[in-house]
Amino acid sequence: MKFDLIIVGGGLAGAALAVALRRSALRIAVIEHAVPRRPEGWDARVYAYSPVSARFLDQLGVWAHLDHQRLAEVAEMRIHGDAGGELVFSAYDSGLEELAWIGESSLVHVEIWESLKRQHNVTLFCPAAPEALEIDEDAATLRLGDGRSLKAALVVGADGRDSWVRERAGIAATITPYGERGVVANFVCERPSRGVAYQWFRADGVLAWLPLPGRHMSMVWSAPDAFADELLGLEAEEFCARVEGAGGRALGKLELAGQRAAFPLRLMRVEETVRPRVALIGDAAHAIHPLSGHGINLGFQDAKALAEVLDALPSWQDAGDLSVLRRYARMRAEEPFLLQYTTHALSRLFGRQDPLSATLRNLGMNLTGRVPVLKNALVRYAANGRF
């Protein structure tokens, strides 16, 4: 079967790329192992969608169709150091309507998938898994596990941190484990968060509370492996008490809503995001510490940038040509690099427990809070991906 573009991975970034190309003449194949579904209750995987990502999803025709009763605006973010440092970001003070939107991964994923199913230029292969990839001068040929063979000018790896496409294309990745896991859980709170997100840099990791609608809240605790095991092993009531205390009982008593989960944290950098007939987007191209909250936003901006490059090609130009793909690579060179190194440096700085490091990092937070120009620049970057 012949296509112009094969996207391996129909997650948020891969599916968004396909939908962004809905008006193009490209024939697109999307390979995904399972159809996304909404879980009962609240999804344990929750993302902070930046305003620029919300605009991108709106351009895709997705944002307006989401159940906005399941989304919460972040109007303010309060960040606390481990020795008196404090930093507050306010949408109102920075002239923004909101800093971000907090919503479940599956909420957005299912809606993007509905758009894919209706898209005239997309063929879905699901459930399906790739088995072999051959790249030659004229095309890339991908064979599925069931024996079907697909041929296209370009293969996009949107298949996550352990990318099969990246490995088969021979693109090296440097992986730095943090020795931590992100423990995630949702709670019903005694008091509503009223659009306030919290983050605490603690000796036992980075704790974030993200507002959900009503009196619900989503937690991400980036904790050392041993402490993560301890948290996961606690009885529900003791677990809630531990989370309450770590957050200074800012939202009163907490009640667990759903199951706990955990995922390993690591920094992943690739030597290149493109090769002839291959491009990487999303977590296949970069993995960062979750303390920035920017992981999925980077993936959406990858999808947007690559779609713009492909959409602008004349019909005679080869989408898999390296000169074409380098345009995408240049567009996406700066932001992931800056966020990877910034979050890595912050993670390492707050991981050091000596008195001098504690003094410097908390002093830095307080000084940043007292310089409005710098603080507003940081807010604008978080909201719009640029200063």
Image (cartoon, rainbow, N blue to C red):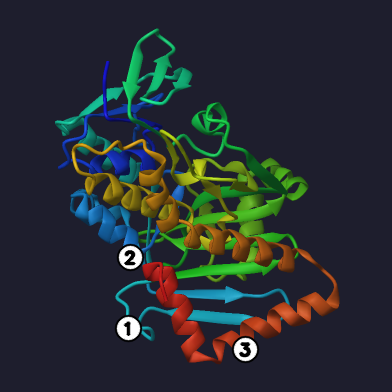
Task: Give the residue displayed 55% in from the left and 39% down from the top.
Answer: 161
The residue that mark 1 highlights is 95
- Mark 1–mark 3 CB contact (< 8 Å): no
- What type is the residue that disc 2 sits on? Pro
* Relative vertical location of residue 297 with respect to residue 311 in this rendering, above or below: below
| Residue at 29% in and 59% down | 54
The first of marks 2 and 3 along the sequence is 2
Q: Residue 326: which disc?
A: none
- Mark closest to the chain's N terminus, 1 or 3: 1
Q: Residue at x 62, y 89 (%)?
A: 367
Indicate the quadrant where residue 337 lies.
Answer: bottom right
What x and y, as percent, mark residue 112?
A: 27, 41
* Quadrant in which the C terminus appears: bottom left
Q: Quadrant of residue 213?
A: bottom left
Q: Is residue 276 left or right of residue 183?
A: left
Quickly name the residue at label 3: 367
Disc ID at residue 51:
2
Q: Amino acid at mark 1?
A: Gly
How many labels, in total? 3
Where's residue 93, x and y in %?
38, 86
Crowding at mark 2 (Cα within 10 Å: few <14, some 14-19, many 20+): many
Label 3: few (<14), some or many (≥20) within 10 Å? Answer: some
Q: Secondary structure at mark 3?
A: helix
